[in-house]
Image (cartoon, rainbow, N blue to C red):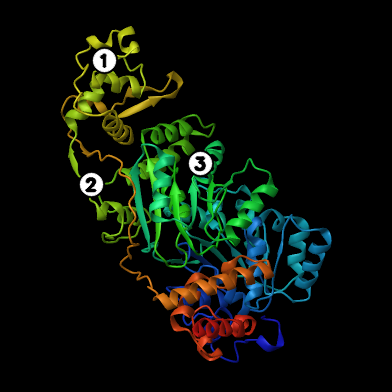
């Protein structure tokens, strides 16, 4: 677009900000920039480097797409998301932007065609996988092409401590060395201070301006429940609150992914598996169905999700504890990208803590890496066990102060704490009296006075602690033990059948020198159906019966149109735009053009069809 005669916005014709706003409105159909978008665009247009931290759904892509359209040359987008490049290019084509990609899925002739267009200045944006970008052939091509900018998407992939490390990202510093006068913009949705520092160091962005938007996603409700029967709890949650909605369920293992998808399908929910052990063709087919169809639930390992632009994912569920808050926030951020209310739900239990700690301890990584991962896990456990607002806890982790949200589980149903010193002493004493040689189940049987064959075999019914915890259920003791492990008062010896061990810190508690507060156990409750509650910064648009009828008709039209164009439905229009069309029911192209998300190209492509549909629905 920056090289075409009818859209050549030079700095002489108007100010940069006016050009940027004009493009935002006419191409993308949005009335105004959000948050820091306008400042970022202007900075990059004038040749400045930038590091942009903006939550998922915050509009990061516009921060490099619009500067690429204004500056001379082609914008090069470095992205690890080969499986999604076609959809990204298709979405840009729908709004009239000339885009292409270069990756390993293409034939040699297709690659030659894209390279020819790049040399001739016939493309606005080209998406390139980092592995291909760093080849000699690609670097030599870039040397002779007029480059507008480099956008390094998913920049957190450069962090060796992070949840999505990609070794090839470290070599992207070559862009600064070989193309020192081309502006670079690095973008990510989640990065703590350590990861930010690493991005700056690895990519040589020491002189870049940093734009850190609010990490808050007020439309997402965070809920962490006591795990009893995880799959059954998940089913209850989906049936009660998200029947017919699109969602993502994250599991730690490939086997659990497949079992969970099968379980949900058996109970009438269309669920698909996705993990790295599947054939690429099967993975691609399932991903395409998730993106193109409504009401699909994707059960996946963390191999799925980065870069997923589907705006109407209504929930993200975790059946296993994530390794870090960054990973958790990145994954939950895939819900509610359209600003509509969404849920981040997790079932969490003692086994999750044991499993994650074992994975770190048994890792072949060096001690420094293990130490960093342990700190990140402790922060994640602290979020799970917090007595305070979960949103405040998450935002504080990313260095952002906030007030209680009134929309997470701990705000809506505040947990209670109690002086858990005596309960802790009972657990610690029992662990000590069995010579720190037995796992959680046996220790809890002794506490509860359960005279099992194994207890008799070791004569543990004769211990002074036998039966001193008979007032609590097994689930209660498991919840208390989980908290002691999370607090570092009890360790698990994985080389000795997961035997519980006392730590140095436990001595002070056993002696009564330190008192500890613990979270009161709350029995897992069956999920109940309730009206989606608006977050403080988000008010869901309620449609009348007539408006809802039109909205449903528009969605059916979108499905058929998307199928004809072979693109995901949201690429045609997201739900938020269709909902606004249904509410306004415009009868002229001018009125339709005024709705957010309707740019010039989409007005030309679909305007008459939509007006005809509106008239037909009104007639009935």
**Rendered position, 560 above or below 9:** above
**Rendered position, 548 above or below 240:** below
Tag of residue 415? 2
* CA gap, disc 1 and disc 3: 42 Å
* Residue under the point 47% across and 74% down: 549
Q: Does label 1 or label 2 sit earlier along the sequence? A: 2
Residue 417 shown left or right of residue 541 in the figure? left
Nearer to the camera, 499 or 365: 499
Nearer to the camera, 287 or 370: 287
Nearer to the camera, 511 or 419: 419
* CA gap, disc 1 and disc 2: 32 Å
Q: How crowded is mark 3: few (under 14 residues within 10 Å), some or many (20 or more)?
A: some
**Rendered position, 477 above or below 601:** above
Q: What element carries label 3?
A: helix
Residue 389 shown left or right of residue 418 in the figure? right
Quarter-of-image position of residue 425 = top left
* CA gap, disc 3 and disc 2: 31 Å
Q: How crowded is mark 2: few (under 14 residues within 10 Å), some or many (20 or more)?
A: some
- Residue tagged 1: 433
**Rendered position, 466 above or below 393:** above
Tag of residue 414? none
Q: Residues within 10 Å of mark 1 (few under 14, many from 20)?
A: some
Q: Is mark 2 on a helix, strand or loop?
A: loop
- Residue tagged 3: 263
Q: What element carries label 1?
A: helix
User: Which x, y percent locates residue 567?
Assistant: 65, 66
Q: Does label 1 or label 3 sit earlier along the sequence? A: 3
Whether residue 265 is visible, yes or no, is yes
User: Which x, y percent locates residue 477?
Assistant: 27, 29
Nearer to the camera, 200 or 549: 549
């Amino acid at each position: 677009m920056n090289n075409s005669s009818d859209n050549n916005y030079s700095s002489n014709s108007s100010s940069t900000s006016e050009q940027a706003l004009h493009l935002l409105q006419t191409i993308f159909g949005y009335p105004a920039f959000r948050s820091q978008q306008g400042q970022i665009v202007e900075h990059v247009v004038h040749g400045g480097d930038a590091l942009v931290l903006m939550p998922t759904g915050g509009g990061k892509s516009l921060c490099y797409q619009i500067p690429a359209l204004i500056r001379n040359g082609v914008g090069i987008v470095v992205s690890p998301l080969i499986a999604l490049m076609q959809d990204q290019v298709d979405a840009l084509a729908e709004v009239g932007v000339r885009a292409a990609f270069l990756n390993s899925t293409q034939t040699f002739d297709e690659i030659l065609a894209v390279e020819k267009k790049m040399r001739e200045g016939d493309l606005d944006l080209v998406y390139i996988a980092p592995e291909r970008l760093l080849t000699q052939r690609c670097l030599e091509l870039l040397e002779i092409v007029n480059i507008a900018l480099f956008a390094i998407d998913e920049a957190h992939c450069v962090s060796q401590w992070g949840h999505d490390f990609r070794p090839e990202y470290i070599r992207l510093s070559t862009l600064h060395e070989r193309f020192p006068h081309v502006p670079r913009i690095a973008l990510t949705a989640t990065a703590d201070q350590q990861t930010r520092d690493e991005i700056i160091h690895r990519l040589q962005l020491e002189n870049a301006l940093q734009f850190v938007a609010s990490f808050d996603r007020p439309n997402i409700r965070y809920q962490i429940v006591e795990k009893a029967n995880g799959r059954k709890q998940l089913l209850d949650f989906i049936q009660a609150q998200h029947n017919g909605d699109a969602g993502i369920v994250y599991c730690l293992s490939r086997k659990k992914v497949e079992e969970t998808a099968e379980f949900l399908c058996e109970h009438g929910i269309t669920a698909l598996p996705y993990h790295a052990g599947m054939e690429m063709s099967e993975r691609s087919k399932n991903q395409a169905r998730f993106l193109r169809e409504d009401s699909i639930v994707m059960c996946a390992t963390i191999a799925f999700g980065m870069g997923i632009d589907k705006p109407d994912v209504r929930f993200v569920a975790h059946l296993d504890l994530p390794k870090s808050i960054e990973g958790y926030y990145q994954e939950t951020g895939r819900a509610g990208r359209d600003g509509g209310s969404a849920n981040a739900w997790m079932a969490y239990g003692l086994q999750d803590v044991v499993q994650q700690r074992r994975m770190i301890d048994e890792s072949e990584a060096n001690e420094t890496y293990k130490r960093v991962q342990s700190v990140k896990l402790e922060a994640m456990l602290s979020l799970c066990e917090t007595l305070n607002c979960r949103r405040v806890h998450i935002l504080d982790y990313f260095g952002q102060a906030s007030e209680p949200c009134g929309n997470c589980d701990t705000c809506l149903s505040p947990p209670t704490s109690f002086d858990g010193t005596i309960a802790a002493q009972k657990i610690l004493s029992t662990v000590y009296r069995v010579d720190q040689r037995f796992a959680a189940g046996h220790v809890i049987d002794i506490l509860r006075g359960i005279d099992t064959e194994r207890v008799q075999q070791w004569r543990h019914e004769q211990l002074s602690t036998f039966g001193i915890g008979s007032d609590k259920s097994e689930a209660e003791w498991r919840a208390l033990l989980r908290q002691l492990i999370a607090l570092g008062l009890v360790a698990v010896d994985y080389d000795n059948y997961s035997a519980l061990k006392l730590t140095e810190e436990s001595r002070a508690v056993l002696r009564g020198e330190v008192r500890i507060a613990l979270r009161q156990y709350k029995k897992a409750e069956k999920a109940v159906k309730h009206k989606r509650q608006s977050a403080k910064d988000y008010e869901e648009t309620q449609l009348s019966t007539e408006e809802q009828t039109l909205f449903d008709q528009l969605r059916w039209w979108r499905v058929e149109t998307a199928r004809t164009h072979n693109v995901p439905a949201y690429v045609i229009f997201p739900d938020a735009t269709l909902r606004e069309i249904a509410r306004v029911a415009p009868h002229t192209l001018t009125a339709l053009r005024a709705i957010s998300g309707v740019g010039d190209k989409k007005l030309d492509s679909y305007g008459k069809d939509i007006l005809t549909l509106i008239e037909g629905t009104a007639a009935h």
